[in-house]
Image (cartoon, rainbow, N blue to C red):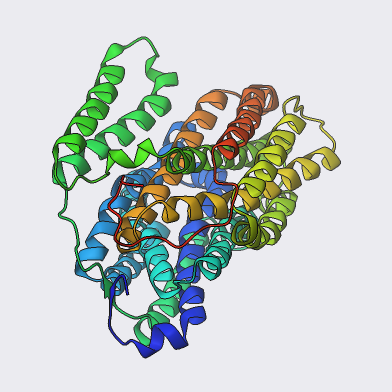
Amino acid sequence: MDTVLLDLPKPVRHRRLVLAICSMSLFVVGLDTTIVNVALPSIGAGLGVGTRGLEWTVDAYTLVLAGLLISSGAIADRFGRRRVFQLGLVVFAVASAACAVAPSIEVLIAARVLQGVGGSMLSPVALAIVVNVITDPKERAQAIGVWAAVFGASMALGPVAGGLLVSGLGWRSVFWVSVPLIAAVLALTVAYVPESRSPSPRGIDVPGQLLLIAFVGGSVALLIEGPHTGWDSPAGYVFVAAALAGFVVTSLRRREPLMDLRLFRRAPFTAAVLGAVVVFAGLNVTLLLSTLYLQHARGLTPAAAGLVTLPMAVAATVCAPLSGFLVGRSGPRLPLLLAGGFTVAGGLCLATLTDHTVLAVLLAAYLCLGIGIGFANAPITNTAVAGLPADRAGVAGGITSTARQFGAAIGVAVAGGLVAGAGPAGLAHASRPGWVLVAGCGLLLLAVARVSPSRRPAAVNSSARPGSQ
């Protein structure tokens, strides 16, 4: 086998249960990524902050996720995936409780940072556990479809669940809801998830890690603070460019870098990473603009605003496992074409948004966007994982998840910048460039589909070195 597995009978006998447990953890991470969006107006009113502070409430979480995911995957490969997974669950639960009782925006943002630390130990590690328990390529593709379905559905369901919770129990309840779910996952992990680790784990690239955090954080900070400090100051651009250059140089010189840049010579792998950025940028532009538009411009309650986006949640839930089936049967190209086409359609539906756009148009747009999200995740994830040896599954999941969270952070920053300073009467008009951007994300997905494999995934050669394929 490709990994050292302890408790050997359990991963074979209970592999579907292990998939369910890992999917539950991803449900919590995905839910927390988006459930906060619908609560933002209530958080702003309760803590007395504007759009700028609310952007940081969302991006503090996604920035830490994006910065630490790869290292968390590598640490799990070295010290044990179940051990790191359990630690992540505990940290995430403690941070969620801290968010729920936060007395100020500063404390809330700090707690969200801690949530990001815990979340970074869940997403790539859960994927690594699934990949190592389910080794058949076709079954793995279908399992990743289930994984992607749960993750995509959780992100799409976030606004619905958040709206109902905020309307009934207040904004703090959106953080409390994670605690019992995590407790259940932790108990099941102890009972059923096997320990595994890589037989040849890599070292931890501390300089690369710090430079990645600097690049990701600097990029998003530039987008969030730009509308307030001005776009003509060169300091921010120099900092981001220097961090990126330093990361590339460090990665090329180190024997075991945080991210093996040779992988990007392979067009399918590069396409998967680009696709992950694009999908989650478009999704988070959609969620933030929709929340502000529906609650501020249209005057809907949080619960009603969440229900308007329900077609997106339903479509993502239905289409994601279908996408996994298609990937296992014929490869990732067809699902990506469907994802791109429906995302373009959804963005264009809202490109001329007004305060009086009929409900049918909104529902149709969210339905198209949900279909796009549902079909996108499985082919992107499968292509990225298939591009690396199986004993680097944690790092593979970390790279793709980093791209997702980087895209999510960019999406929030861009959307917030577009509507910064716009009152309720001007929100619809101010958001129009954002919907054009969402349609553009769909066009990029169509381009990604052209360089993605058109055949079903083959078995991964565990002896191949990264970048050799």
Between 186 and 163, the residue placed more toward the observer is 186
Residue 41 % position (x, y): 56, 43
Residue 107 % position (x, y): 32, 49
Q: Which of the 4 image quadrants contains residue 368? A: top right
Q: Which of the 4 image quadrants contains residue 131? A: bottom left
Q: In this view, does 221 lie above or below 176?
A: above
- Left or right of 418: which side holds 240? left
Q: Which of the 4 image quadrants contains residue 449? A: top right
Residue 256 % position (x, y): 17, 48
Between 202 and 162, the residue placed more toward the observer is 202
Between 364 and 278, the residue placed more toward the observer is 278
**What residue is rendered at 49% in x and 51% in y?**
383
Q: Can residue 58 be seen in this view?
A: no
Residue 158 % position (x, y): 58, 56
Q: In this view, does 398 lie above or below 82?
A: above
Q: Where does the N terminus fall, quadrant-wise?
A: bottom left
**What residue is rendered at 52% in x and 49% in y?**
380
How many tags in the picture? 0
- Left or right of 325: which side holds 193? left
Q: Can residue 426 be seen in this view?
A: yes
**What residue is rendered at 29% in x and 20% in y?**
236
